[in-house]
Amino acid sequence: MENSAKRLTKYFTAFLCLAMCSQLYATNWTLTPSSQISFGIKSVGLSIVEGRFNQVQSQLVFDPELPQRGLATLVLDVDSLSLSKPSLKGLILGSEFFDAAEFKQVTFKSTSIKPIAYAKYQIYGNLTLRGVTKPVIFDTTLTPTANNAKLLDVRATTTINRSDFGMRKALGGVGEQVTIQLKGQWKPAQ
């Protein structure tokens, strides 16, 4: 009788822990205000221009026990873009690049999340830029924040070709490839 009581207590404790862990992780997440979504264009290995989207709508549904059931969505406001070279803002937002007058947002919607190794994932999805949608893969790391278990640290990167999205091809030595990066933290959505 004593062994069955111990077993019952052990199972109840394991169930309670699982329920609490699921409550912590199987939630909707949103990016913290200090998180950054940025891009960089290089030429001959040198940084030509870097940009950061300052207004972002974000959602992540993620449970590390079932990552394949997750989904991620990002909506970036093109007009909120700040650049490392402010003198290029008119050109970058103009019709040859972002065409911000016609296309107000850049969106990413995941189609699948595949675990690669501990805390490492590939997030497959569709990036829509200038009204053109193409598949991309973000190489992503998601780890609990060391000093706050309710936050997830995130680093994600992908590289695209500008011309695939209707942007002008190489211009004055500006590279064709653009690296897009997300770094920051996901917090539980309210």
Image (cartoon, rainbow, N blue to C red):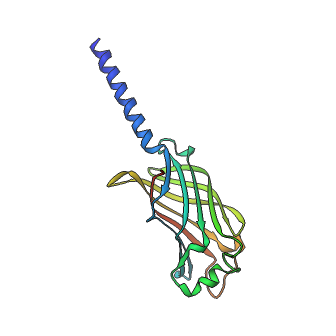
Q: Position of residue 44 (x, y in %)?
A: 56, 83
Tell me which residue sits at (54%, 81%) in the image.
Answer: 49
Q: Position of residue 174 (x, y in %)?
A: 61, 83
Q: Residue 100 sits in which quadrant?
A: bottom right
Front-most of residues 171 and 95: 95
Q: Residue 175 sits in which quadrant?
A: bottom right
Tell me which residue sits at (44%, 50%) in the image.
Answer: 118
Q: How many marks?
A: 0
With respect to residue 80, does 145 lie above or below? above
Tell me which residue sits at (69%, 62%) in the image.
Answer: 134
The outermost residue toward the front is 190
Front-most of residues 183 and 151: 151
Front-most of residues 43 and 185: 185
Q: Position of residue 27 (x, y in %)?
A: 49, 45
With respect to residue 84, does 186 lie above or below? above
* Left or right of 114, for residue 32: left
